[in-house]
Amino acid sequence: MSSSAQTISEREIKGARRRARLRSELTGIGFVLPFLAAYALFLLWPIILGLRMSFFDWSLTGSGTNEFLAFRNYAELFGDPAFWGSLWHTVLFTVLSTPPLVVLGFVLALLANRAIPGRWLFRLAFFAPYVMPSSVVALIWIWLYQPGFGLINSYLDANVGWLTDQSIAMISIVITTIWWTIGFNFVLYLAGLQEIPPELREAASIDGAGAWAQLRYITIPLLQRVTTLVVVLQVLASLKVFDQIYLMTGGGPNYSTRPVIEYVYDSGFTQFRVGYASAVSYVFFVIILAISVIQFVVLSRRQEGA
């Protein structure tokens, strides 16, 4: 075979490979395209539209949509005590709910990971409330918190307004949330515990390490990545609280439990100020993003240092 014929043959092979690669890429794009279209239509476009509405006097009723306000919606919300009050309630709920949800999730995972008879029942019991709808959880705990005939007040022989007293309404919501959502953290910790090789504990036991020493020097250090994930996800979930507060107290009493997302809902769908509600949403998004980045960086550095 001459050198020119060999060159032509190599070119044909390369061309065939390019065409095959192109067909493969086009096939992949064809499979992904429906998802991308739905993603752009139902997520990207609403994000862009919401950002645009935040600069206008956009009303849910259709009035005032042509008035461009520039940054006046943002200036108004920074001077609105109701916004800062709802932000404080969101932060307070996060601070009150995150530590017990992380610690108790870890403790329950330790208990359910022990080789005891019927441990599957404990795992089911700890996780079952998490799969319940928020409306069902709210109805259960509203009945438990009833001042007159609720189970808690009947047991305590008291008449406490768990959801009507401003001083304890938030605590009542936190207790409900812990009972409802602790199963998620429990499952994450349980999966992390099952990944720890049992040979490590056996070797430590042979060397004379007790249960507390094994927990402190083996279990907790090896679960640092899981703990980082749990803390980050829990903070994000707590900052986005809405369902249980809205269903159980409606943000009351006297707006003492209203979080930011409910304030957005009230502004957009009660007062019909969609433009202002959009501005609040984007400010809250920036706050959550900043908290998430700071939290992830701090936890990652601690993990690397350990």
Image (cartoon, helix red, strand yellow):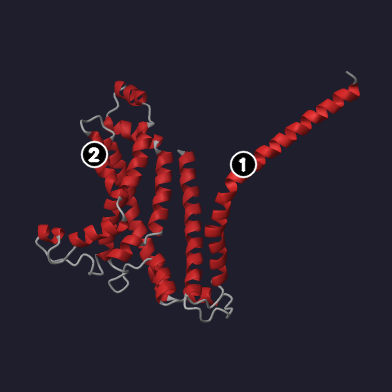
Q: Secondary structure at mark 1?
A: helix
**Residue 8, horizontal then vertical, whole percent:** 85, 28
Q: Is residue 35 above or below residue 84?
A: above
**In the displayed structure, does residue 45 sit left or right of residue 262?**
right
Q: Residue at x 40, y 43 (%)?
A: 227
Query: What amino acid type is highlighted by mark number 2?
Result: Phe
Q: Quadrant of the N terminus?
A: top right
Residue 122, label in figure: 2
Q: Residue at x 28, y 67 (%)?
A: 249
Q: Within 10 angstroms of label 2, few (less than 14), some, or many (20 or more) residues?
A: some
Q: Quadrant of residue 185?
A: top left
**Rendered image quadrant of residue 16:** top right
280 or 56: which is nearer to us?
56
> Which of the image's four quarters has the C terminus?
top left
Q: Secondary structure at mark 2?
A: helix
Does residue 202 appear in the picture of this structure? yes
Above or below 302: residue 211: above
Q: State the image coordinates of residue 211 (x, y, percent, origin top left).
A: 27, 31
Q: Amino acid at mark 1?
A: Gly
Whole-number angstrom distance, CA of label 2 to CA of label 1: 44 Å
In the rendered image, is residue 100 in sight? no
Mark 2 or 1, nearer chain start: 1
Image coordinates of residue 4 in percent, x first then y, are: 90, 25
Residue labelled with disc 1? 28
- From the viewer's perspective, is residue 250 above or below residue 64? above
Q: Residue at x 41, y 40 (%)?
A: 226
Task: Pinpoint residue 38: horizontal percent, then vertical percent.
Answer: 54, 54
Residue lying at 31% horizontally and 69% vertically, measured from the top left: 250
